[in-house]
């Protein structure tokens, strides 16, 4: 008897779970710093973030940049930080379900380009070109002045991102997220700290999983020896049937986040004449695929969720993108 078509992705999903293990736990300092950056992005001054940047640099100095192939599993971010975010809908979760279900993973990647070019690539560039084949639609609406931010005249820029993606022709995902990027200066270096969160549960069709909450943060900075590094951390709450499924999702997230580092490097290598301080009229909208910013435009989608689902479908359908 032939299986119903919508069961095929589910059957393909189940097969790899047995072989996946959770990433090893991050050392205490690194695990705590991951959530520390996310939680202090709302501070009015940079003192706490600057202290975090220097503590992270010291951790790299003491421990090096090598990490387990599966990345690190990090401690959960605080419930208060999640529920205190603006424009977030966590109505599908009780706080107890949130605390019981949230898991996270972190990876570290090295880059061979200067900080401003990396930031321009992640904030201003056409994300459909940076991450080819990941998105069908990727729209970012800047809420504050991205040109001022890139020129270092403003400390932070905010944006709302909307994306649509299709994975291996069997799964369609629509999601919206709020993203923030912030320059942080210390006595020793300049860093860029970024965080983003789903503003509402993603629309996944067919509904292979329910992901009512996802959070993402990165810290990009030069070390004392000039090495440029980017730490990426993702947390999510997924309503799946088993611990094995959560382990698989963590494993998939780590691989996807590492892949974004390679894609960013490839894009910067191919685009040495990057835009620098973008000359736009201020807050606006960018529509992916147009390759320009103008009044009323700006776009970049949340990497974590599309990348997770990309991994799910790749590992299930034998192939198969957030930025």
Image (tube, grey):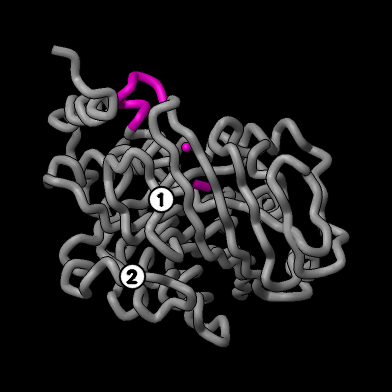
Residue 291 higher or lower than 134, as above or below: below
Residue 302 higher or lower than 255, as above or below: below
Q: Nearer the viewer, residue 119 or 125?
A: 125
In the rendered image, residue 88, in percent from the top left (x then y), is placed at 43, 71
- Residue shown at 33%/58% (left/top)? 235
- Residue shown at 72%/47% (left/top)? 125
Q: Nearer the viewer, residue 280 or 210?
A: 210
- Which image quadrant is residue 158 in? bottom right
Query: Is residue 200 something that shows in the picture?
Result: yes
Residue 71 higher or lower than 100, as above or below: above
- Residue designated by label 1: 203
Q: How many marks?
A: 2
Residue furthest top in the image = 1
- Mark 2 lies on a secondary structure that is loop
Q: In the figure, is residue 83 to the left or right of 258? A: left
- Range of residues picked out in magenta: 313-323
In the rendered image, residue 314, in percent from the top left (x then y), is placed at 37, 26
- Residue designated by label 2: 90
């Amino acid at each position: 008897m032939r299986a119903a078509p919508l069961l095929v992705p589910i059957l393909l999903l189940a097969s790899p779970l047995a072989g996946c293990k959770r990433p090893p736990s991050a050392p205490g300092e690194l695990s705590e710093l991951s959530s520390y950056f996310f939680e202090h992005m709302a501070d009015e001054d940079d003192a706490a973030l600057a202290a975090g940047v220097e503590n992270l640099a010291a951790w790299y100095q003491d421990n090096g940049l090598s990490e387990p192939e599966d990345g690190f599993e990090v401690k959960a971010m605080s419930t208060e930080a999640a529920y205190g975010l603006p424009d977030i809908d966590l109505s599908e979760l009780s706080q107890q379900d949130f605390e019981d279900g949230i898991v996270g993973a972190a990876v570290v990647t090295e880059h061979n380009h200067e900080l401003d070019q990396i930031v321009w690539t992640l904030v201003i560039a056409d994300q459909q070109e940076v991450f080819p084949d990941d998105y069908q639609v990727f729209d970012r609406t800047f809420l504050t002045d991205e040109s001022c931010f890139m020129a270092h005249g403003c400390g932070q820029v905010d944006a709302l991102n909307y994306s649509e993606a299709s994975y291996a022709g069997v799964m369609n995902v629509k999601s919206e997220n709020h993203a923030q990027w912030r320059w942080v200066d210390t006595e020793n270096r300049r860093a860029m700290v970024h965080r983003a969160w789903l503003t509402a549960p993603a629309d996944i069709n067919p509904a292979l999983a329910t992901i009512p909450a996802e959070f993402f943060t990165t810290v990009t900075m030069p070390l004392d020896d000039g090495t440029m590094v980017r730490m990426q951390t993702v947390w999510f709450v997924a309503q799946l049937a088993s611990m094995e499924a959560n382990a698989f999702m963590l494993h998939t997230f780590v691989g996807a986040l590492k892949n974004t580092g390679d894609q960013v490097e490839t894009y910067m290598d191919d685009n040495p004449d990057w835009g620098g301080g973008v000359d736009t009229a201020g807050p606006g909208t960018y529509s992916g695929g147009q390759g320009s910013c103008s009044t009323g435009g700006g776009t970049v989608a949340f990497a974590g969720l599309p990348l997770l689902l990309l991994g799910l479908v790749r590992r299930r359908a034998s192939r198969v993108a957030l930025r």
